[in-house]
Image: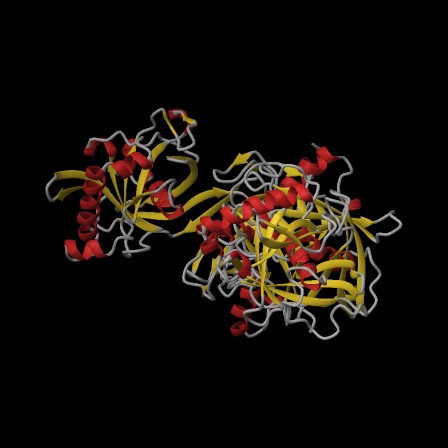
Amino acid sequence: MPQIRIPAVFMRGGTSNALVFKREDLPEDDAAWPALFLAAMGSPDPNGRQLNGMGGGISSLSKICVIGPPTRKDADIDYSFFQIGVTDETVDTSGNCGNMSSAMGPFAIDEGLVPAPPDGGEAVVRIHNTNTDKIIVGRFQTEGGKARVSGDFALDGVSGTGAPIRLEFLDPGGAGTGRLLPTGQSLDILEVPGLGPVEASMVDAANPCVFVAAESIGRTGTELPDALEADAECLAILEKIRRAASLAMGIADTEDEAGRIPSIPKVAMIFAPTDCSTLSGARQSAADYEIGIRMISIGRPHRAVPLTGGICLAVATRIPGSLPNRLARPSEAEIRVGHPSGTLSLDADVTVSPDGTIHAKHGAVYRTARRMFEGHVLVPA
Amino acid sequence: MNDQRPVPFVFMRGGTSRGPYMRRADLPADEETLSRVLVSMIGAGHPLNIDGLGGGNPVATKTAMLSASDDDWADIDYFFAQVAVDKPLVDYAPTCGNILSGVGPAAVELGLIAPRDGETTVRIRMVNTGARAEARFEVRGGHPVYGGAQSIHGVPGSAAPVALQFMDTIGSRTGAMLPTGRVRDTIDGIEVTCLDVAMPMVIARAEDLGITGYEGSGALDADTELFARFEPIRREAGRRMGLGDVSDKVVPKFGVLASPKGEGAAAARYFMPWKAHPTMAVTGAQCLAACLMLPGSVGSGMARLPSGAGQGDAPFTLSLEHPKGTIDVALDCKVTNAGLDLRSAGIMRTARLLARGEAMVPSHVWQG
């Protein structure tokens, strides 16, 4: 039997890549999608290589995006994300992929799903991510009716440079707790058992996080993950802070319970810009970033910074009176966060109303994307 | 209009490798620009090839460039490029037998061969090494058939077979199928057959070496006595085959045969030569299969042969059992009173068209 041909585009978005389909090119009944997606990616492959499909044998190279007409009035397109198992048959729709989100605006313009600005210039595409039911706004330059690919923006984790894509995650506040400032304050004194009082900012934007100054726990902040990994005392202190914050933010009711929810809040030590070096040994000058971070992710020092953690920090730097606000070099434009692998460019729009209410309108990241092939994928009928 | 330049391509799995197959004429003629374009297309220079078609694995960073051949014998010239994974490098020295499996079907898909329904034979010259091979596969409705029942180790499921027959395999290194001039030699009291088909080999019966021939590669590697026994035999055989002192050379290889344990024609083990192959080498499989057909050899009479095998009417398939499965070898040969008239040997692989369209390369890469 001949193979089925489905129009498809293969794109890099940030530090991921994925097959991108238009909704109209897929079977009407989405119950037929998982089998189709698995075959297109070459899954499941007990050898873990996905050689019989488009996958690359690892989660960041085993993704599928589907773009269709918007189902919300405030969106230009619907975007659904599917994480495809490599050795098994999972097709996971529980979360969005921030990286692939960056490719969706350019895809919508290039495919004519959203009209390009008539005279070139900046395109603004409002993307409804159906996995999270959140709106993400993509902003990027166009040329001749297509998204511009080349540019001089360097994204850590991708060789070379490209045209920047600004991704604004709207209303990121309260993602985990329902409130941007779960304690009601931008700065708290946490009573940490066995340690005493520690200044901390507990912010919930994209993900709940607790930030402490590296200095306040006797560190510089410029320590690299291997050094932190070996510093059992530091990891223990940060875990105590995280658990105390979990109680203060209303995530857990007891310290034991906080220990059983290791994914949130995330804990990080932050520091004012300092000359230091990155994991690759490259020099990171104080002038290269506005604020430094060392984040712990489920007990382990993160080798960069998760996108959600970066967005939370960017929002926090724009909240008057917070610890990140105090330590960051003031910046009207982008906020570059220094992490062990380099820097992450972010932005945030935070408003303070006359009654003192603080609202995070959006947190933004900058990525690049590239269309790597266009045509059809073929799957066995 | 755009800042990327499209290159027409078909993306195929060939055997246990994968990559874009393109028309040579659609790519830059000069090697320096070509290398830049291939590096960009694959996304080489990054451990995951995140910005390209590569899959973060050397078997998924291969490319094939095809053209109509000006050779009298060949239909298609197949120029192979091994692109590196985490370095921006391209190696044009080797060819690839796995990617070769997709060359015939890709030549049809790319319009380099006019499709005719039925069994199609494409004669291929491997530009990198000068070797030649024939690919046979089914065409239906103007396109190669990809679905089928052939399974190969390392690829889940099954697909349509692509039969690859390698030319010039007889006497590949020594100039003669039987470089010692005999079908059997006795060395250190062990009977061996010294045979050069695709690869010069010294082949013994498993039982003569005190093993079953059904061992896994780990068990064989752990058997130091076995290596101590066959290495002197291999060295003497190398001398008799005209290969000189082979004590520090990896050729000839050592192989053992045993009667079949499962559904195959025979059990076979291949040594590289100081380590057992985890499965089976493509070259070694052809030599071991030929040994099973050679009257008077150590493998003669051992195999469970399909009917008609060796009568010279048509190529037939021998399935060799290796430590992790089987490999199917296609032989075109006739057993005569004078011995074995071997015309060609080959293997059964599969290929699948995964995607087709245009690969995008940033224009500045092309321009340099």
If the image is split into quadrants, where does the C terminus of chain A sit?
bottom right
Q: Which residue is drawn at 20% across and 33% down?
A: A216
Residue B326 rendering spot, x and y as whole percentages: 59, 64
Q: State which quadrant residue B232 falls in.
A: top right
For residue A75, above or below residue B306: above
Q: State which quadrant residue A226 falls in.
A: top left
Q: How does the figure colour the protein chain or chains?
A: secondary structure
Residue B21 rendering spot, x and y as whole percentages: 71, 51
If the image is split into quadrants, where does the N terminus of chain A sit?
bottom right
Q: Which residue is drawn at 45% across and 52% down?
A: B223
Q: Is residue B41 left or right of residue A100?
A: right
Residue B197 rendering spot, x and y as whole percentages: 71, 53
Q: Is residue A101 left or right of residue B176?
A: left
Q: Residue furthest front?
A: B189
Residue B191 rendering spot, x and y as whole percentages: 61, 55
Number of numbered markers:
0
Does residue B114 appear anywhere in the picture? Answer: yes
Does residue B3 appear anywhere in the picture? Answer: no
In front of the other: B280 or A282: B280
In front of the other: A255 or A205: A255
For residue A285, above or below residue A128: above
Q: Which residue is drawn at 39% across and 40% down?
A: A304
In front of the other: B61 or B338: B338
